[in-house]
Amino acid sequence: MWPEYDKTLTADPARGAPDPHRQARALLAQAYYVRLPDSFAEHLDAVRHSAHQDASLTAALEAGGTGITQTLAAGPDLVTHYEHPDGSHGIYGKALISAAMDAHRLGITGPLPLNFLHDAAPGYLTGSERAAADPDTWFTGALAHARSLIKQAIRPLQEVPRSSGVGALPGVVGLADYLQQHGRRTRRRLCPPATFWDAATYHLTSPDDLTHLADAARDRYRLRHAAHLYCAAVEAGSAIALLRLAEMREKAGDQEEAERLYRAAADTGSTMALLRLAKMREKAGGHEGVERLYRAVAADTGNISALMWLAEMREKAGDQEEAERLYRAAAEVGSTMGLERLVKMQEKAGGQEEAERLARQAADTGKPTVLVRLAEMREKAEDQEGAERLYRAAADTGSTLALLRLAEMREKAGDHEEAERLYRAAAADTGDPITLMGRAEMREEAGDQEGAERLARQAAAADTGSTIALMWLAERREKAEDQAGAERLYRAAAEAGSTMGLERLVKMREKAGDQEEAERLARQVADAGNPYVSARLVTRKFGRYGLEADGTASGPWEWPQPRTAASGSR
């Protein structure tokens, strides 16, 4: 499994966010990991010993370098073939591979139709390259180049076997796994050209693939392309795409059309569409009808969001008994947030024993964060003994956060030896950068700014792929009015993959009056595809209609209508 997939499947969702990978996370929690190193530099003697019985290892050693696995898979040669194309058809073959890379990194999981690659490729070429191509032969030559056999082992674009029987599926290809990974790493900040989005809308037929690409277009603020892709997904049978399209209309201020599309999605059985309708009515002030709708959804499906929203409404209305019942119901169907709210209500009402029982119960079922939150409440209430006891209980269930909180408490109490032991224990779970940042924050709280920055710099140096320390340092430099230092650190964070670092750079350039650079950086934010950052920033910079594929601001455009939702239902 590629590390990025493992990270996606095992990450805890943000509070209140959907949890689509709960079962995968539970499964992987039981897995024994064998981590394959990027390099065998420290094990070359073992490789040489094994090479006596394995001719492929002998060839890999003769190729030089320590990336044995990559060499065995012809990885470096695949990349060289892609990045340095030769021959009259090389640049056109590279365009096909680039389009395939973008398709996979943005969500397509299945085979790629050749007609999709044919129509997407021109956008990856310069004007002179397009002009030089023979309209009758360019694609045949490009495909031959992209299907060249590398190291007598693997092709960049490969035939896809039939699911049963023998032979290859006609009219489709797959992209070599190594090139998929290379594309995710090297093209992560690039937005595909208009030909890519248009070809996908016209040629792809998988509702899941179309929805994933529509999500990617929306996240990059290519709203016009997103709307057309969602329509194509709806027409291919995707109910979730209908919901997404309704959400887009609601954000655009078209409440009437949003409600019609939500109703059409609800007719397909979408509980979330019903909840969105309820939210719209709640915003409009129709609380009585909203509560009735929430109750209907909760009763029919046990939907966590419906239970939580209904519980919050009852709690705000002062109906503590009913709120508690609903939080319990949400907790029983897997809501960690429901458990946290329930524990908080018990703690506030003086039921500390019940609050602790619930929190321990949550920890026993793999949710130690509830116990940590209760410990934090005790700590704020200055019940240091109770807080420490709960932190230790959470730590015993495997919570690294609890270890860090314990270390902070021990450091505050002057027990530096125990604090250091706990920090080391946390480091064994997470790696040094996180524990160093925990200590940096402690030093800052104690007024030792110089010591805090020293630890943060150590954290940044310990893990160059982590942006937490760089962002922390940049924010402190900015507060200290060291604009040059802050900008340098924000740029370093952005280069390491932080979209938030890019957003901060945009604001700094705006303050400095450099609007041209601010706009250039804002386009980079949009191209990177972080919806939590790009939507608010790009709307402010470029307007409500989104961006064209080339990054220019879109003018007004006509919303497409999915045929299967034209009458309000599928």
Image (cartoon, grey):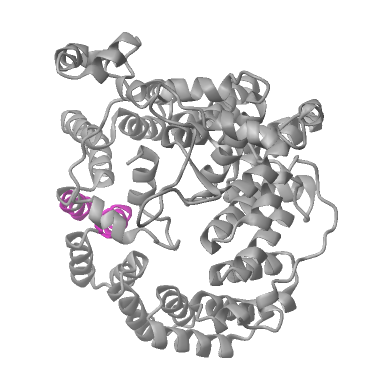
Q: Is residue 197 left or right of residue 30?
A: right
Vertical relation: 62 (above or below) 118: above
Expressed as whole percent of the image width and height from the top left, the position of residue 121 reads 68, 39
Q: Which residue is pictured at 25% across the width and 59% down the height?
A: 367
| Residue 312 visible in image | yes
| Residue 375 visible in image | no
Q: Which residue is pictured at 44% across the width and 73% down the height?
A: 305
Vertical relation: 275 (above or below) 462: below
Expressed as whole percent of the image width and height from the top left, the position of residue 561 reads 73, 71
The answer to which of 186 and 61 lies nearer the viewer is: 61
Q: Quadrant of the C terminus?
A: bottom right
Q: Quadrant of the N terminus?
A: top left
Q: Residue 345: within the magenta? A: no
**Count of residue discs:** 0
Vertical relation: 482 (above or below) 375: above
The answer to which of 289 and 88 lies nearer the viewer is: 88
Expressed as whole percent of the image width and height from the top left, the position of residue 456 reads 41, 26
Vertical relation: 378 (above or below) 146: below
Q: Which residue is pictured at 30% across the width and 77% down the height?
A: 328
Rendering quarter of residue 264: bottom right
Q: Residue 368: within the magenta? A: yes
Expressed as whole percent of the image width and height from the top left, the position of residue 468 reads 45, 34
> What is the residue that sits farthest to the right in this orientation?
555
Rendering quarter of residue 7: top left
Q: Give the overall secondary structure of the magenta segment.
A: helix
Q: Which residue is pictured at 60% across the width and 46% down the height?
A: 114
Q: Which residues are magenta?
A: 367-393
Q: Is residue 384 left or right of residue 167?
A: left
The answer to which of 329 and 241 lies nearer the viewer is: 241
